[in-house]
Image: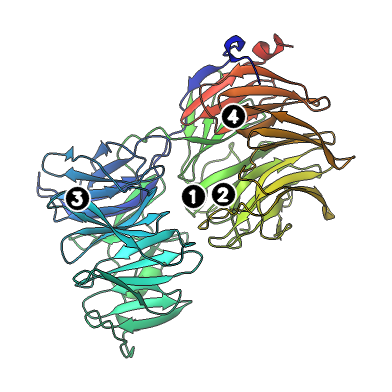
Amino acid sequence: MFKREAAPKLYEFVGQPCRNFNILGQTSLIDPLDGKEKHVLSNFALGGTGTVVIIDTLTGEGEQHELPIGNGAWGIVNWNNEKLVIGTCVEQAYLHVLDLRTRTWAEPLKSIGESYFWKMGLGSDGKVYGGTYPGCSLMQYDPATHTLVNLGKVSENPKNLYSRPVWGEAPGYIFVYYGFDTKGLKVYDIAKGTFQEFGRPEAEIREINDRFICTRTNGQLDFYDPQTLQPLDDAGLADQLKPSKITLANGQQLPFIELEDDRLASFRGQDYFIVDKPSSPQDYDTPQPIALAQIPAKAPVTEIFTLVEDPKGQIWGASGFGQTIFRFDPATGEYWNSSSVCNEGGEVYGMVFVGDRLFTASYVGGDHTVYDPDQPWDQLNNVNPHTLRSVGPQLIRPEGRSVLGPDGGIWTGWSANYGVYGGGLSRVDPETLEVESWYDPIPERAIASVAADDQYVYFTTHSGTSGLATRHDIPWQLGIWEPGKGLIDQYDYPASPNETFGIAASQGKVAFAAGTEIHIFDVAERKVVHTVSVSQPCLWLLKLDDEHVAAFCGDELIRIHLHSGEASLLSLLPGTIRAATLTAAGDIYFSVRTSLYVIRARELSQLN
């Protein structure tokens, strides 16, 4: 190990340029302070603290209230125009209650053992219900006593980790969707305190009202009596379903809420809108000339998820959640944040500049986009950024990030859809914008990280996926991929609880991380030739030059020689990094949660 007491701190703090809204839930209320109707948005701020934004539906004026703790989440319920009930994630599921008369928060409540509160609903008993992850539980909040109770696991299948969302419109019942190893609906009987299966396997709730419950299973609609839960003759009932989405001029459909003055309210990225209700159900599917308005509040600081330099020396990055990107000028400290880069929710993982254009890869829709910073922003009409062919729904999360391959293509590593073990690679041709993809090059393995040298694309795998627990009983791999040919070899690493994230390659040498070990693989010899032990897990590897890589291991930055395996401690760090990039000038920019730092090339050169 290394002598920390002698290690310098070479980094400089340069700013917090990543700021965005990531609205996950909405409701409306009649404000007890002025009697006016308000549109309420629940905002998630990864790396920061969530907020709620309360907007006057007539004047457009807004007020923002920061949660006591937590990033924010999907759950938001208006309780009798007296309280707002908010759920949060990611590290701990909290429940918060805002008194609307005093605009003060009650003491936060924890859902013990849970990380996420998903969407919540109001039951006929006046209590608020919500689903969770990873416990797949149903939570019950009693506003009268300010207590939170776990009513139990919704699914008996231990592989099902999610219970989301919930519906409380049918008197006496709470409906919960669960997944993702198996999927379906449970109904909770409030009086009896019991769960039972409801509907067809994999059915989802389409609508609940006082006349019927409608489920949808792979496009098929079924109807049930909301009191007896027995099937109904569906003759004519489908015609009574309310529209659930409204269509923008670009064809995108967005969910909405109804206001009391016969208008509709919704949001899109960094904007919101309020429009008159269409005159007929058919008009909801007709593209509407909807005017978007900027959310009337200051966007909070959020976590930096990806970093890259452009040819002009500007630093670009992506937000940890919210599907936005930012630009930072190292010379002036000025920054700019975008609106949504594509129509789907999620975040940008992959960022690669080819010439002056930025290519991105995003979760959750498996989207590729191309953006020209020198041209006007017009994502709404799919002009700039322009969305290319998606690799979803088979591949949805580009957690392997993106690299420029030896063939000039942009290569991205993906994990599979929710509830499916697997992954894949994609390639974007920067000239033709053609997208190619390969599903499961190594069966049932997600792509954890991707690198390239002048001959091959390299990737590591893992056995996790969205919606299911990671498997630790099977090996993971280092894959060697030759553009134009495919997978030419793989190196199996023994089953281990150590996840693999970092990878870097140069001239036939590949460094890859496995927990507290960094391995150097010789492509010609097809074996690991050096192993470096470190004291903290390595989450990022960065090529410094043809012979060296930088390993970000907890709060230590370690330089490793690819040919000898010799390692030295370059600098202590302010925390565990989220992303890093090397500039053409030799500066290392990296992020720790919401903060951007730099280690100057001149500082590194003094250590040589």
Q: Earlier in the sequence, mark 3 or mark 2?
A: 3
Residue mark closest to the camera, 3 vs 1: 3
Q: Is residue 280 visible?
A: no
In what element is the residue under mark 4? loop
Instruction: Give the alpha-carbon distance from disc 1 to disc 4, as whole Å.
Output: 29 Å
Q: Amino acid at mark 3?
A: Thr
**Quadrant of the snapshot with the N terminus:** top right
Question: In the image, is 200 to the left or to the right of 272?
Answer: right
Q: Which residue is found at the position 45% from the left and 26% from the top?
A: 16
In what element is the residue under mark 1? loop
Question: Height in image: 312 above or below 148?
Answer: above
Disc 2 target residue: 362
Disc 4 target residue: 536
Q: Are marks 4 and 2 in contact (CB under 8 Å)?
A: no
Give how far across and how far down residue 602 sits, in percent: 67, 11
The type of colouring in the image is: rainbow
Instruction: Give the alpha-carbon distance from disc 3 to disc 2, as whole Å.
Output: 39 Å
Disc 3 target residue: 147
**Quadrant of the snapshot with the C terminus:** top right
Q: Which residue is found at the position 23% from the left and 73% from the top?
A: 170
Query: In terms of depth relative to the viewer, which is nearer, 246 or 223?
Result: 223
Residue mark closest to the camera, 3 vs 2: 3
Disc 1 target residue: 346
Question: Height in image: 212 above or below 328?
Answer: below
Q: Earlier in the sequence, mark 3 or mark 4?
A: 3
Q: Amino acid at mark 1?
A: Gly
Instruction: Give the alpha-carbon distance from disc 4 to disc 2, as whole Å.
Output: 29 Å
Question: In the image, is 300 to the left or to the right of 57?
Answer: right
Q: Are marks 3 and 1 in contact (CB under 8 Å)?
A: no
